[in-house]
Every structure is written in C-alpha cells, then in structure tokens.
Image (cartoon, rainbow, N blue to C red):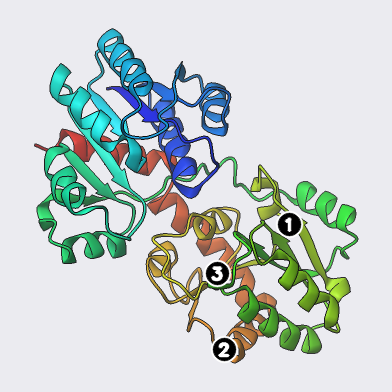
Amino acid sequence: MKFLFVGTNPENTGAATHFVALGQALVEAGHQVSAVVYPDGLIANALARAGVRLYPAKFRNVFDLRGYRATFKAARELKPDWLVGNFGKEYWPLILVSRLLGVPVALFRHRTPPMGRASGYLVPRLAQRFFAVSANARQAYVERGVPQQLVRVLYNPVNMQECRPDTERRNAILHRLGIPQDAIVLGYFGRIHHSKGILTLLEALDGAMAQEPRLHCIWLGHGPDVQQLGERIDAGSFAHRHHMLGWIDDVHPYYSAISMLAFPSIATETFGRVSVEAQAAGAPVLGSNIGGVPETLSPNVTGLLLPPGNAAAWRNAILKMCEVQMREPMGVAARDFVDRHFSTRVIADEFVRILSDG
C-alpha cells in the first residue's frame, strides 16, 4: 500500500513517537510511506532515517492555509491509498483533502479528554477509519456517543531491535553513573509530574532501599515537579542511590540498564508506550492498575499491577521484584509478550488488515 502520513507537531510527545513508529513499521513491512511534517523537527528527522519521503509543512492550527496547500499538493502528487493523521489540529484538513481527492483517511486519537462537540460527533463519522490506541480509550469514546463499530483499536508498535537487551550498554551506563555492576536498578522514564505518581514511587523506594542495599533508581525525564522531586531526594537517606538524568532524546539504551521499570501514574493513562518498550528490553514492569496501563503487560507474568498511590504496596512489589527468581523469568516472558502483541511486524500487519476490511 501507499501511505501519506500528515503530522506537523514539532514536539516529542507520545503521539509523535507513535506516528514515527507506525511509519517505520509500514516501511519495514514493504509499504511506501511519505509524510507531511514540520521541517527539521524530531518527527522529520526520525522518519528521514527510515527512508520516508518528506514534505515540509506547518499547521499552526486548523485554519492555516499553508498546511492545506502542502498536504493537498503532496496527496495529489503521490496518489496514496490512504491518508493517515495523528494530531487533532490536522483532523479537519485531512478530512477535507480526503473529500476533495477521493482518498480515504485514517485518524488516530491519543487522548481521552473530549473533543469539541461538533468534532467529537463528526470526526469519527467522516473518517473512513478512526483509531483508539487502547481498549480503555475506545471505551471512553463509545461512552461519549461514538458508535462502537466506528472505533478500532491499534496499539503502539515497538521496534524490537531498538529495544533489545544489551549487556555491554548496561555495563557502560552503570559505570558512567557510578552504579555498581551488581546493582538492582529501577527505572522511571517519563514526565516528572505529580500526576505520574512520582512522589508515591519515591516514598516506596525509600522504604525498599532501607531493606535492599543494592537497589538504585534512574529517573529519566523532565517536567514541572523536577525541583520538588530533587529536593525530596536530597532530603532523604538514599540520595546517592538516585540518579536524575533529565531529558534524554533516545531512551532506548537505558532500557538495557534497568532491572525493572516503574509506571506509577495516579491519573488515567491512555496507554503506556514506556511499559511496552521496557518489556521489549527484558525488563519487567510495575504498573498502576489504571486506564490503559493494564493492556501493556501480562499481570503476574511480565510484571505486576498495583493500586495507584499506595506507597506500601509499591514498596512491597519493588522488594519482591528485587528477588532474582521473580524478576528474571518475568523479563524473559516480557520480551516474548511484546514480540507477539506490539512488535512493528504485528502492528503493521494489523493496521493493513483493518484498512483492507471493508
């Protein structure tokens, strides 16, 4: 098939990561992919490395005629089988181009907060395919009145090669951070915001570190609560075992460095790509039993689901995962689980199947 992706967001968000990963997955599967993208942005650079033909454009908002012109020109030149959109500001432009050129459009929705009344009603009905990125998100849209048959689920694809476990990378990262090679390393990769459960996690870690001297934590990410988190870590008894690295553009090498991943959100998550990527690297996941998080792991097989905000339960789960007889079989099962359910091969095939299903 021939696809034209349209995604001009310059920011590196979860939706942007999905946009790139799906495009890469389709290229790997042998399809022809082109993309209208923000020039020299993170999406553009990542897709260029995958061999995707790029058309630079900017959609400042739904009324930006420059974006319309660029998208219309690319679609008329390429004659794609499908237009694919990932961002709300481009829903209506893509629907319009779809109608003008007779090219079907597939739109993804990554958030559960409602769209405006008109868009919430019309967009799922006017797009030839409308996708949620989890069953939890799909249920939210259905509860707002979108007919069930109009909402398909397609999970985020994960590149198994990029996320592969790598002992040499692990050793190098631990050495650079001054972490002993025999350490048990918990990773938190995400936004540093209280809604992500970071303070619950810190409290749980303090309790677990008091009982397990080999336990360290790597914090990757930034956000409005970085200073508060850092101050609390510095005021505690185990500051030397916390490693705050800030924002990292490419987190993939760091999955090899961790023994387990924590995903402790106390607010609803639509999905949880970081959970799937960590498991692809052989790291079991401790995840909050909330929103779409349970769909990212196999409970008691590749990780554990825990009550959001319950520091005692998280402390006990961290200590349980510190036991090698618990952690290592889960890590092996985790990589197989992701390969079967979220690998680029599986998701690309499922996407094409859904598009081909009349």
Give the residue type that dot 2 points to.
Answer: Ala
Give the residue type that dot 1 points to.
Answer: Ala
The answer to whether the residue labelled 3 contacts the one labelled 1, judged by CB atoms less than 8 Å apart, is: no
Please state if 77 lies on the left or on the right of 331 as rendered.
left
Give the residue type that dot 3 points to.
Answer: Lys
Mark 1 or mark 2: whose residue is earlier in sequence: 1
Q: What residue is disc 3 on? A: 196
User: Residue 283, can we see it?
Assistant: yes
Q: Residues within 10 Å of mark 1 (few under 14, many from 20)?
A: many
Tell me the mark number nearer the camera, choosing from 1 and 2. Answer: 2
Q: Quadrant of the C terminus?
A: top left
Tell me the mark number nearer the camera, choosing from 3 and 2. Answer: 3
Q: Residue furthest top?
A: 77
User: Residue 102, can we see it?
Assistant: no
Tell me the mark number nearer the camera, choosing from 3 and 1. Answer: 3
Q: Is residue 116 or residue 70 the one in the foreground?
A: 116
Q: Residues within 10 Å of mark 2 (few under 14, many from 20)?
A: few
Could you tell me how far apart the alpha carbons at marks 1 and 2 are, in whole angstroms? 24 Å
Q: Is residue 163 or residue 47 the one in the foreground?
A: 47
Q: What residue is disc 1 on? A: 257
Residue 254 in the image: x percent, y percent? 70, 52
Q: Quadrant of the N terminus?
A: top left
Numbered mark located on residue 313 in the image: 2
**Quarter of the image holding residue 139?**
bottom left
